[in-house]
Amino acid sequence: QVQLVESGGGLVQAGGSLRLSCAASERTFGFGTMAWFRQAPGKEREFVAAITRNGDTAYADSVQGRFTISRDNAKNTVYLQKNSLKPEDTAVFYCAATDYYSDTLSTNRRAYAYWGQGTQVTVSA
């Protein structure tokens, strides 16, 4: 099964910016909706943002106005530009995707069939 591979995580100071990328591990027909989730220590994995093939987007209230999701359909790649980072944004960020014909903007992790291994983002105060 095709897997997703995240990159771009790291350590950043509060107020700084970071850009995450996620691409398929091998050639694939393509994905439907692509999304980002995150999981902080001791907490459940939560929805961050999603984008359909047509470019429709959805964001969690906690990141609205600070994070921007985008994608390159030709490259089967999704990005997450994160600005004005806060210490509470510290988490492992996971990329997720649905099958090609799905255009859901679901915030439920069960809607996504493909997942990456995650990339750590740490925001220092």
Image: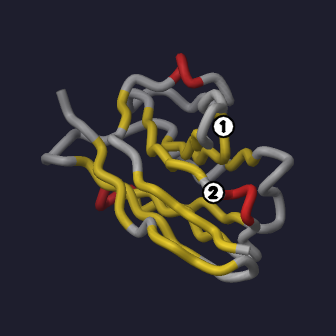
Secondary structure state at the residue bearing disc 1 = strand
Instruction: Please state which of residues 116 and 73 is positioned toward the viewer in this rendering.
Output: 116
Mark sitting on residue 47: 1
Where residue 51 appears, as percent x and y from the top left, is 59, 47
How many C-alpha atoms fall within 10 Å of the one at disc 1: few (<14), some, or many (≥20)?
Answer: many
Look at the picture and state if 108 lies above or below 115: above
**Type of amino acid under label 2:** Thr
Q: Residue at x 30, y 44 (%)?
A: 4
Q: Quadrant of the C terminus?
A: bottom right
Tally of numbered discs? 2
Instruction: Please state which of residues 56 and 10 is positioned toward the viewer in this rendering.
Output: 10
Q: Residue at x 41, y 69 (%)?
A: 8
Mark sitting on residue 90: 2
Q: Residue at x 35, y 63 (%)?
A: 7
Mark sitting on residue 116: none
Where residue 31 appears, as percent x and y from the top left, is 37, 39
Q: Quadrant of the N terminus?
A: top left
**Type of amino acid under label 1:** Phe
Residue 75's image quarter?
bottom left
Q: Is residue 15 toward the left or the right of residue 94 in the image?
A: right
Instruction: Please state which of residues 79 and 76 is positioned toward the viewer in this rendering.
Output: 79
The CA span between labels 2 and 1 is: 14 Å
Instruction: Please state which of residues 75 and 67 is positioned toward the viewer in this rendering.
Output: 67
